[in-house]
Image (tube, grey):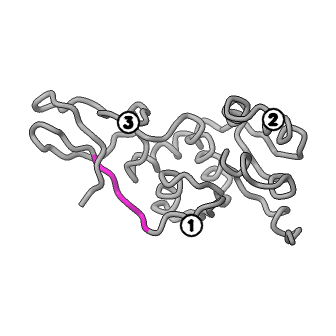
Amino acid sequence: MVDWRVSTLMRVLDTAALLYWPATEIAGGICSISQQTELEKVSPQRYMLVNSLEVDWRDVEPNWLDKARELAADSGDLPRLSKVDLDVLALAVGLNLPLYTDDYRLQNTMQKAGLETKSVGTSGAKQVWRWELRCTGCGKKESVPSDVESSKKGPVKDCEICGSPMLLKRAK
């Protein structure tokens, strides 16, 4: 049985919630407009269903996005977050609302910032990790800059000392 009070809470929903939750849980959620394109690409049928619900679709304020990028850079997760991930994070940060997501990088960023996150369908992140850039050549370590480009894998940038690729690694 679904508790009707849960669906009336103000909360930001990541795309995982839009894909897997029942309609009664999605209604009333706050989502980024950029998630519509992502959802339509992944599941056109689900996109049609979600668009028929009372979802609060919002544009992201530029200052919220700046703050989200800053928090994601601080946790080291920024290079592996997509534009849609950053939009969702920015909504949660800007509105100071819980973020419902199964994305461990989003959970890590929120938890490191002391913000509330809830899992959609997984057990969720058990601990906060800090990431850093590490050179594959000379071993130089540095924090993740807030202007780094997003990519799902591979080097984040080249080392300023030796020119070798710098990879995202868990800080020890």
Marks 1/2: CA–CA distance: 27 Å
Q: Nearer the viewer, residue 165 or 114?
A: 165
Q: Does 129 sit left or right of 115 as displayed? A: left
Query: Residue sitting at 45 percent across and 48 percent down?
Result: 72
Q: Amino acid at mark 1?
A: Ser
Q: Give the mark nearest the N terminus, 2 or 3.
A: 2
Marks 2/3: CA–CA distance: 29 Å
Predominant SS of the magenta segment: loop
Q: Amino acid at mark 3?
A: Lys
Query: Residue sitting at 62 percent across and 54 percent down?
Result: 101
Q: Give the mark nearest the N terminus, 3 or 1.
A: 1
User: Magenta residues?
Assistant: 127-132
Q: Does 27 sit left or right of 68 as displayed? A: right
| Residue 71 x, y percent position in the rendering | 46, 50
| Residue 14 x, y percent position in the rendering | 66, 48
Query: Residue sitting at 48 percent across and 51 percent down?
Result: 105
Q: Does 8 sit left or right of 61 as displayed? A: right
Query: Residue sitting at 87 percent across and 72 percent down?
Result: 1
Q: Rate crowding at label 3 as few (under 14), some (14 to 19) or many (20 or more) other CA atoms within 10 Å.
A: few
| Residue 168 x, y percent position in the rendering | 30, 44
Helix, strand or loop under label 2 = helix
Q: Rate crowding at label 2 as few (under 14), some (14 to 19) or many (20 or more) other CA atoms within 10 Å.
A: few
In this view, 98 is above or below 134: below
Asked if the magenta segment contains residue 65, the reply would be no
Residue under label 2: 45
Q: Which mark is residue 123?
A: 1
In this view, 64 is above or below 100: above
Residue under label 3: 153
